[in-house]
Image (cartoon, helix red, strand yellow):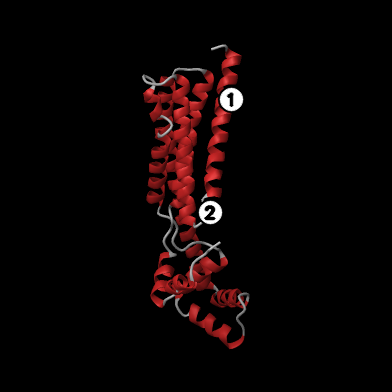
Amino acid sequence: MDAKSDDTLRSEHTEEAIAQRLAGATQHSYLGDFVLGAVDGAVTTFAVVSGVAGAGLPSGVAVVLGFANVLADGFSMAVGNYLSTRSEHEVLELARQTERDHIDRLPEGEREEIRQIFRGKGFDGELLETITDTITEERERWVDTMVTEELGLQLVPPHPVKAASVTFVAFMLAGLVPILPLFLTSYLTATQTFMTSAVATLVTFALIGAAKARATRQSFLRPVLETLAIGGSAAFLAYFAGALLKSLTGV
């Protein structure tokens, strides 16, 4: 629950603060790209570490497979995110071109769509006609309104390169965490090394959840528990699969 004081609320609702907040609303947040990349990176590499531990294989195997997965899967996720966000731009441009064509060919029909959209918002009579006239007197404003109100599209989709970069960097940073403790095998037993990797990974999950909670102004508990549950489930499945395959193959 938002527990802001009255003074804080008033300061956030000055004319300048409102204008700044509305201008910022058109800027895409890359938090989702970061969280997705970080969670997937940590899950992917810790699953490798868990599977190797469950199979009783040398830690060097986990290091090789872990690094290979970090690079390959991180790049794959980044490319996938790039293509996905670029598709959003292409869909938006196609929608804009379609609406321009409809306005040029059947302007009265498009005016009626605007009229019905704002009638559905509770406007009527002379005020509704004023709104309709104001929107349709400028072509690009008309197009923007149709794109957002009729089709539900964002006018400013995320930047493909930025989205891909954030995903890749987050994947790499979080994905390396489960691997780094494996370089301590000279000082720790195999069990100690695996437990160190597990603790480091769980801390990483908790930090990702905390960052998400802070950015979304949620309670810390739920996002942290969610990321811990996701990571823990993946690790358990990987460890169980490794142990099962070892018993079946006798390796």
Residue at image mark 1:
240
Q: Quadrant of residue 248?
A: top right
Q: Quadrant of residue 116?
A: bottom right
Q: Is residue 82 visible?
A: yes
> x and y percent of residue 239 in the render?
55, 26
Tell me which numbered mark, 1 or 2, is placed earlier along the sequence.
Answer: 2
Inspect the image, locate mark 2, and give the three-letter code of the amino acid beneath it. Answer: Ser
| SS label for mark 2 | loop
Residue at 48%, 21% (x, y): give it: 191
> Quadrant of the image for the N terminus?
bottom right
Disc 1 to disc 2, how far (Cα)? 33 Å
On residue 140, the disc is: none
| Depicted 97 relative to depicted 134: above or below | above
Foreground tag (1 vs 2): 2
On residue 219, the disc is: 2
Inspect the image, locate mark 1, and give the three-letter code of the amino acid beneath it. Answer: Phe
| Depicted 157 relative to depicted 13: above or below | above
Q: Nearer the viewer, residue 3 or 194?
A: 3
| SS label for mark 1 | helix
> x and y percent of residue 65 in the render?
43, 25
